Image (tube, grey):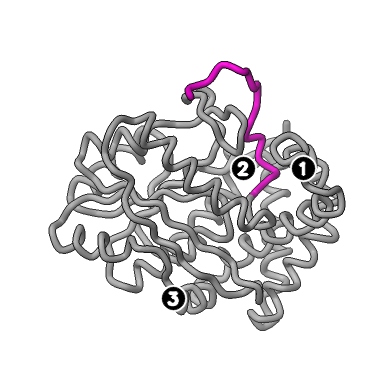
Amino acid sequence: MAKLGSISLRHRAQDWLAAAFLEGLKPLPYRQRIPLLGWLGAHVIGPLAGLRSRVRANLSMVAPELPMAERNRIAQQVPGNMARTIGEIFSGAEFVAHATRSEVEGSGLAYLHDAHAKGQPVILVTGHLGNYDAARALLLAKGFKVAGFYMPMRNPAFNARYVAAISRIGTPVFARGRDGLVKMLRFLRQGGMVGLVADHYMQHGELLDFMGQPARTALSAAEMALKYNALLVPVYGIRQPDGLNFNVRIEAPIPHSDPVTMTKALNTSLEALVRQHMDQWMWTHRRWKKNRPEYAT
């Protein structure tokens, strides 16, 4: 493949195309730009990229009781939420202004204030629901020390653009990998709060139930909570009906026990919200790859 510097021409072309798309809409006011991106995701990008078929396939597996009309509605809306989320992440201060006006629900905020006062580490665990960066922006605005821990994009050119965008929402941010893990753990041990997205398929993870199906799930968040005496707190940014604003849900910490039991509790927490907001979770994930009937119960 042709190269330009250390980045392939294909990756540069993909990055330029994404930049042209996102930057080309910047002149539009935020309240018009984000809904437009949502419409394009639902009606243009979703069908062209084959995202609707992935959503329907996953829904057929984990929610076969849903009427076909409802599956089709969710399959249309999920790419719309994804496009809105990308647009928000790349909107910096405009997104932060909306996120910091979020209502807080759940009983967990008091636990975070107590941990912050004591210098106790906190691991904030979320999933690809709504826009999880709304919670990070809100907590940063409230004075908490919150770091993001992200999975680098496969396209290194776009990854640089993405890291710059999430850094405008707040810092520090650490990349998944050896160097990023060392820095993240140092931040955590110093009494920081670290946000993790925990609903990825992990090849060497434990087979645990999620939405009634076995899913490879990392135990690392629970393991770190036990090792560093950190609170393990489920946190979510739930999109509101207007499509622009959020409720940030902060739940009570998961009680310390063992990594499998704690991770099951995290899965249960996320599953409950996914079932309430089916069109806000990223059903395009291949979350249940290589399913087998044998998994931890």
Is there a contact, CB below 8 Å, between mark 2 and mark 3?
A: no
* Main secondary structure type of the part rendered in magenta: loop
Q: Tell me if residue 78 is in the magenta stretch.
A: no
Q: Quadrant of residue 147?
A: bottom left
Q: CA distance from mark 1 to mark 2?
A: 38 Å
Q: Quadrant of residue 100?
A: bottom left
> Residue 221 vs residue 290: left or right?
left
Which amino acid, by three-letter code, is at mark 2? Asn
Disc number at residue 40? none
Q: Residue furthest left?
A: 118
Q: CA distance from mark 2 to mark 3?
A: 30 Å
Q: CA distance from mark 1 to mark 3?
A: 37 Å
| Residue found 65% across the figure and 21% down from its top | 290
Disc number at residue 155? 2
Range shown magenta:
282-297
Disc number at residue 100? 3
Q: Nearer the viewer, residue 227 or 41?
A: 227
Q: Earlier in the sequence, mark 1 or mark 2?
A: 1
Q: Earlier in the sequence, mark 1 or mark 3?
A: 1
Q: Where is residue 59? Give x, y as percent.
A: 74, 42
Q: How packed is label 1: few (under 14 Cα within 10 Å), some, or many (20 or more)?
A: few
Query: Can you identify the residue that label 1 sits on?
Result: 65
The correct choice, above or below, for 197 with respect to 119 in the image is: above
Which amino acid, by three-letter code, is at mark 3? Thr
Say what secondary structure mark 1 lies in: loop
Which amino acid, by three-letter code, is at mark 1? Glu
| Residue found 57% across the figure and 43% down from its top | 153
Is there a contact, CB below 8 Å, between mark 1 and mark 3?
A: no
